[in-house]
Image (cartoon, rainbow, N blue to C red):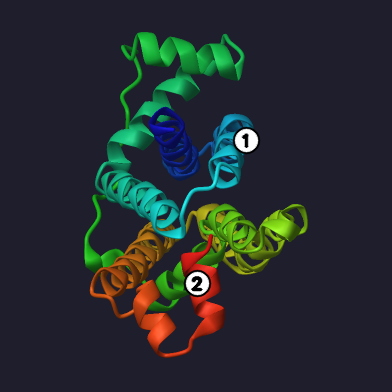
Amino acid sequence: MILLTLIAILCYVLCHTFEMASFGSRVAGRITNRAALGTTLSQTVYTTADFILILFLPTLGYIVESGITINDYLIIVLAAYILTFIVSIVMIIKLNSLQQFYQVIFAKYKDNTIPIAILKSLINKKTDLNVKDCNDFTFDKVILKKTLVSSLAYLFLVTGFFNAFMLALFFPEHRLTLIQFTAAFHGFGAVIFAFYLDPMLSRSIDNYSDDIAWLKNVYSILLGRALSYFAIIILLSVFLQLRSLNILSCDYLLENNSLRLLELLCFY
């Protein structure tokens, strides 16, 4: 079970790492005046994350069906979010280095397919190209409104799988139905991202008369995503702390006749 737990956590972190790394391609595309290629490569990297789900979802499903307690399940979820939050901070800080790597891929793509260009760039980053820089992250490059909207969108996008499987843990007799709610959780965030965040980012990237707004949008979206991880970490930590202080313990719920909560938190 320990091995499966590590696999589930690692898969979740890797999946979100690829998704966040895809933003570097769009930055590189804007800097090198190759926005179309940047968007295409961004989608390629983003889609790669879906392959990780092939291992992640069956592993998480087996863990849930093996009779894991709600406390142990939430500890696994908390560990996954903490590691992903750390990765998200690194991505924001190292965005310039990341987009420079994508510029190398662009250069090698001239004579290769995208997969071959990526492999060659990983093996040998040397190129005759003079890579261009983007400004590093500072808080004055963040737009509060867009950061909050991004955080709201990603609160749904990053919690979909864990929420659905948690419901399956609470109500095992309906687990097949409840797991399908992953699409519902993702749907809310996807709508916000598809109809507001992504068009806003694309419009600013295509606007070459403004060299500031597009980068602010990128950093605002990435910071909003990081804040969504942080918010979930806080909520889970508080919940687990309350459980450890016996405020939401089984004995406490029994003494206060909270029978439904007792059934959910103690019998599964």
Q: Is residue 142 left or right of residue 184?
A: left
Nearer to us in this view, 267 or 119: 267
Residue identified by numbered label 1: 58
Q: Is residue 264 left or right of residue 168?
A: left
Up the image or down, 171 lies above or below 18; here it is below
Residue drawn at (47%, 89%) of the image: 257
Q: Amino acid at mark 2?
A: Leu
Up the image or down, 29 lies above or below 238; here it is above
Residue identified by numbered label 2: 152
Instruction: Kindly report the distance in space between the C-alpha atoms of the residues bearing marks 2 and 1.
Output: 28 Å
Residue drawn at (56%, 59%) of the image: 166
Extreme-bottom residue of the structure: 256
Q: Residue 194: x, y in percent?
A: 66, 61
Q: Helix, strand or loop at disc 2?
A: helix
Q: Are marks 2 and 1 in contact (CB under 8 Å)?
A: no
Quadrant occupied by the N terminus: top left
Q: Residue 33: x, y in percent?
A: 50, 39
- Residue 178's image quarter? bottom right
Q: Is residue 251 visible?
A: yes
- Residue 143's image quarter? bottom left
Residue drawn at (36%, 77%) of the image: 251
Q: Amino acid at mark 1?
A: Pro
Give the crowd class for mark 1: few <14, some 14-19, many >=20 residues within 10 Å.
few
Nearer to us in this view, 60 or 264: 264
Give the crowd class for mark 2: few <14, some 14-19, many >=20 residues within 10 Å.
some
Q: Residue 108: x, y in percent?
A: 48, 14
Q: Nearer the viewer, mark 2 or mark 1?
A: 1
Up the image or down, 185 lies above or below 73; here it is below
